[in-house]
Amino acid sequence: MKKILLCFDNSETSLVASEVALRLAKTFGSEIVGIHGYNAAMHEGAFKSMEPFLPSRYQKEETLQKQREVHNDLIHTGMEQISLSCLKSLNGSFHRAGIHFKTVVREGKNFKALQEILSSEGGDLVVVGSSGFNCNGNGFLGSVCLRLLRGNDKDFLIIKKDVNHTQPTGVVCLDGSSTALHALRAAKRFVEQCDATLHLLYVFDSSLHRNLFGRLKESVMDGEHFSFNSKEQERLHDEFIDKGLATVGKMILDEAEREVFSTGPEYMKKILDGPIYRRICDYASEVEADLLFVGRTGRHFTEGIDIGSVAENVVRYAPCSVWVAGSKR
């Protein structure tokens, strides 16, 4: 983890994000790039919309044009300086910790400006608050956070609250996908440095399969001359689904154990049945997890998916901060 990109806007969550980024940088010897986007063009548009309401002495086109130029220069210069000043406030804490820190600001629509910076800077991890100044409760994700997450195949640490670095508890969501293994490797690096306890979690939803089987049964029994031993088929199906999906989960956890944990930190394995994202979040609450690790897409990935539904809902409803592992390595 050589370079950490920290999205910072001076909101409460970004202040927490800066503290987490600082501790990660100290742990892994990383440099930090503080990034911020400012939208001067939006203020230019707002100024133009107010022109008809200016006093009559300002309504001449020559005067208006001069006012536009003065206003635009002031806005561009002022907002750039405000952005730099906002990031400069972090200099002291990073300098005292011996962390190399630089700042990059760019004009443009906030998430687009940040995406351009992410593309040009590269980096190994993006740390961003789950929301900025507009937080509306459980399940809410800020538009910048969500658009960055959907638009960039990188490792993201989505900050919802502070991440404990003293013997923390981590939960890794595994489903047999390559991105879940990337999440597991990230979790291993984290817990090895922080003396953490790790839970390897597999969740399957048997009720979904039962529902689909019930609809199939109703459909085929409506056909003519079709013999269907409903009760026996249901018994066999339910037994196969319950035992089969649990067995698949055991295989996935055992494979993860062999591949990543031949040596290393303490960990536990858990297989659960229920609605997948909800059960993950509930389990994180039960074990008082400090950090959840999840791959950005699962086993059902197909071209065109930017982030899986389970990953997005985990980010939305998790009781703790979430590390979303990218698929590209």
Image (cartoon, helix red, strand yellow):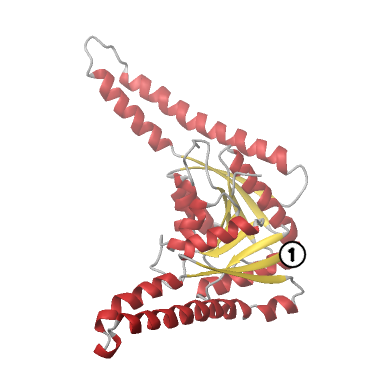
Residue 37 in sight: yes
For the view shown, which residue lies furthest in the top direction?
A: 225
Question: Residue 284's spot in the image, x, y percent?
Answer: 53, 56
Q: Give the number of callouts.
A: 1
Residue drawn at point x = 47 percent, y = 40 percent: 304
Question: Residue 53's spot in the image, x, y percent?
Answer: 25, 83
Question: Residue 139's spot in the image, x, y percent?
Answer: 41, 60
What is the quadrant of the C terminus in the image? top right
Residue drawn at point x = 44 percent, y = 63 percent: 142
The residue closer to the viewer here, 258 or 18, is 18
Residue 237 in the image: above or below residue 224: below
Question: Residue 2's spot in the image, x, y percent?
Answer: 73, 59
Specify the amino acid type for callout 1.
Thr
For the view shown, which residue lies furthest in the front direction?
A: 62
Residue drawn at point x = 74 percent, y = 68 percent: 26
- Residue occupied by mark 1: 27
What is the quadrant of the N terminus in the image? bottom right
Q: How busy is the neighbourhood of tag 1: few (under 14 within 10 Å), some, or many (20 plus)?
A: some
Residue 166 in sight: no
Kindly indicate the quadrant of the structure image that contains residue 102.
bottom right
The residue closer to the viewer here, 66 or 10, is 66
In this image, 251 relative to 210: left or right? right
The residue closer to the viewer here, 6 or 18, is 6
Kindly indicate the quadrant of the structure image that contains residue 35.
bottom right
In this image, 17 relative to 261: left or right? left
Q: What element carries label 1?
A: helix
